[in-house]
Image (cartoon, rainbow, N blue to C red):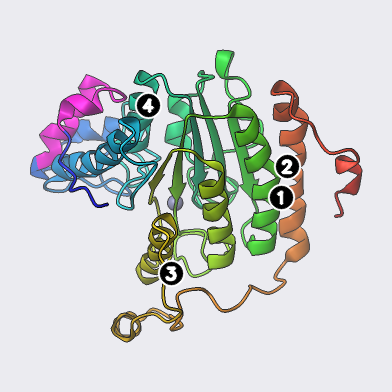
Amino acid sequence: MYEAPTQADGEEARAFHTDEYLAILKEANDGVFKEKYAGYGMGPGDNPVFPGMYDFSLTVLGCTMTAARLIGEKKVKRAFNMAGGMHHAMRDRASGFCFINDIAVAIEYFLSKKMKVMYVDIDAHHGDGVQAAFYDSNRVLTLSLHESGRSLFPGTGFTDEIGEEKGKGYSVNVPLRFGTDDATFIWAFDQVFEPIIDKFNPDVLVSLVACDMMHTDPLANMNLTSEGFLHAVRKMREKSTRWLCLGGGGYNEFNTARLWTLVWALLNDIDLPDELPEEFVKKARTEGFQLHGLMDDPYRMGEWRKQEVMTEAQNSIRDIKRTIFPMHKIKVKKGFFDDLFY
Ligand code: ZN
């Protein structure tokens, strides 16, 4: 089913953001920059002030909240808002193209319904805003797989960020080396996602299915194809009873459109034709994007720096199995640490 979303009002955003920050955002809706905005992360750079920015942010939030309510009211099991996923926005400031954190607001809504939430962030950039929002909570478990903060914004998301107070053990980070390919990503994802979701047993899964880990993305340095990406999406579908799926990043826009179409089809049990519409491919090429004519990527990426990327993934997983797994009494397969092969 398709439900037309409605724009959120500022009231809804207060579930996560401070009144002071929301007032500034509303004031900036006229697109005229004022010096005081800089203290809220806004200005030249990633978070420019533009006309209608408050309305735009509330529209994105409205879409995500429409999807969240359909799930919370048990009208649907799964919903997808590809425009959503502003994972960098903080409680009191803008960050990384994100002004209102629709994910954190949606999670607050699920918490108000007494639902336990697992959040999975598949995006080249660390899901820092959502992690920070629930860092001391044991009702929300966040799992983020991303390009290491050593080479990419926002420079966080290391394995020692595990949460605090009651939330200790409920923030899980899998930093991966730039150049990480399908095989390494799939290995790392399988090492953590299933054991954790089985143990935590959330009432709802919220996830970001961003496309900036793809090998063609101009803003990040990962090397995935549709194979690694869809592996994670399929697993999340298989293991969730209720699932709010959000878009997130993706800066090769034609590739992103292709991949979110694949996600949409998967969520709706639709078989897509193998080939992309001719018109779409033509338009992409006219605009200078390299695009093959198929829905799925027809090849696996090569063995580029295989050893380095696998070593870094193994180090991340080793840390998680040593620190987080014992906190949740998740068993580690006998001999796991001896079998790491690089
Ligand atoms: Zn991103």
User: Judging from the image, what secondary structure is the residue with disc 1 in?
Assistant: helix
Q: Which residue is mark 4?
A: 110
User: Judging from the image, what secondary structure is the residue with disc 2 in?
Assistant: helix
| Mark closer to the chain start, 3 or 1 | 3
Q: Amino acid at mark 4?
A: Phe
Task: Between label 3 and label 1, give the one nearer the viewer.
Answer: 3
Give the main secondary structure, helix, strand or loop, of the magenta stretch.
Answer: helix
Q: Which residue is mark 1?
A: 313
Q: Which residue is mark 2?
A: 317
Question: In this rendering, does residue 225 appear at all?
Answer: no
Q: Which residue is mark 3?
A: 271
Q: Are marks 4 and 2 in contact (CB under 8 Å)?
A: no
Task: Between label 3 and label 2, give the one nearer the viewer.
Answer: 3
Tell me the magenta residue range. 9-29
Kindly tell me whether mark 1's CB lies below 8 Å from ligand 1.
no
| Mark closer to the chain start, 3 or 2 | 3
The span from disc 3 to disc 2 (Cα, nearest Å) is 35 Å
Q: Position of residue 286 (x, y in %)?
A: 30, 85
Q: Position of residue 158 (x, y in %)?
A: 62, 37
Q: Amino acid at mark 1?
A: Ala
